[in-house]
Image (cartoon, rainbow, N blue to C red):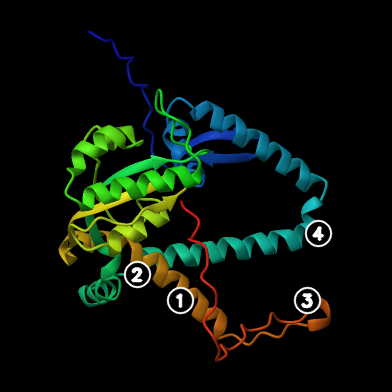
Amino acid sequence: MTLQPAAPVVAQVPPDKVVLTIGDEKVTAGEIDRMIEMIPEQYRNQMRTTGRRQFADNIIRLKVMAQEARRRKLDETPAYKQQLAFQGEQLLAQSLYQNLLTTTKVDDAAARAYYDQHKSEYEMVKAHHILIRVKGSPVPLRKDQKDLTDEEALAKAKDIRKKLVDGADFATLAKAESDDVGSGANGGDVGEFGHGRMVAPFEQAALSLPIGQISEPVKSQFGYHIIRVDERKTKTFDEVRADIEKKLPPEIARKTMDDLKNNVSVVMDPEYFGPAPQAPAAPTLGPPPAAKAPPTAK
């Protein structure tokens, strides 16, 4: 039996009780609790229990220094007053943002509209793959395997794809040839995933590949992937509604703050701040641009 240490006993006192006196200044339990609320959340429980005295020591040091600063009339200097005003505005701006977050309610119509506009983001696929490692890949080289150049790896991937198209068993080849030993041991099964879960080239290929079709070799920083999508579905509104209701308030709050900024007349001195950034040039008619390299993988 494992013996767990007893939980610390924390004294419970009325919030208006004075629990700390520093010179002529008195601090109540309620004031201490509100100070603790201002520190990062991961430290709050400790400061309310085993770290309560340590927190008090920090408050004592802060208060003593502030009292001495007032005795020296540092709070009357222009620099202090300017900094205090600026920090006060920062606090007010943060308070507004938090108020917008807590008061914004996402109704059913807004949540459904967001779902309809972003339905493709909730698409999920189940897939298998075979990975052929290339030199420099972060995937460890398998025992007794040759470190293939890009050309050698691509040629091997194309050969494996041909075998699959000709009817070879995917799981058998994955177990024998895939350098992703984790999925290879399961016949190449990578399970179910959606947007943002895989490296970009793999994800883009899998989300666009018809069910059952064997992909051409897909290059990522790991090597060449041969992919087969087994199932594709889109999560229902009810499945993702809770996520949408968490996601929308910050977006709505940011838009509200952007609207506030845009509705206020602002004049910036170009000599002091420099010229405004140029708007992107309008597209011109002409031949399509050359194909770009695949997006950087995540």
Which quadrant of the figure contains the N terminus? Answer: top left
- Where is mark 3, residue-wise? 273
Q: Please name the residue shown 23% across and 58% down the image.
A: 124
Q: Is residue 25 above or below residue 278?
A: above
Amino acid type, residue under disc 3 in the picture: Phe
Q: CA distance from mark 2 to mark 3?
A: 35 Å
Question: Which quadrant holds residue 103?
Answer: bottom left
Question: Which quadrant holds residue 214?
Answer: bottom left
Near mark 4 (Cα within 10 A), the count class, few <14, some 14-19 or many ≥20, is: few
Q: Are marks 1 and 2 in contact (CB under 8 Å)?
A: no
Q: Label 4's element?
A: helix
Residue 228, labelled with which disc?
A: none
Of the image marks 3 and 1, the number of the one nearer the N terminus: 1
In the rendered image, the residue lying farthest to the top is 1
Q: CA distance from mark 3 to mark 4?
A: 23 Å
Q: Label 2's element?
A: loop
> Could you say which is closer to the camera, residue 147 or residue 14?
147
Q: Nearer the viewer, mark 3 or mark 4?
A: 3
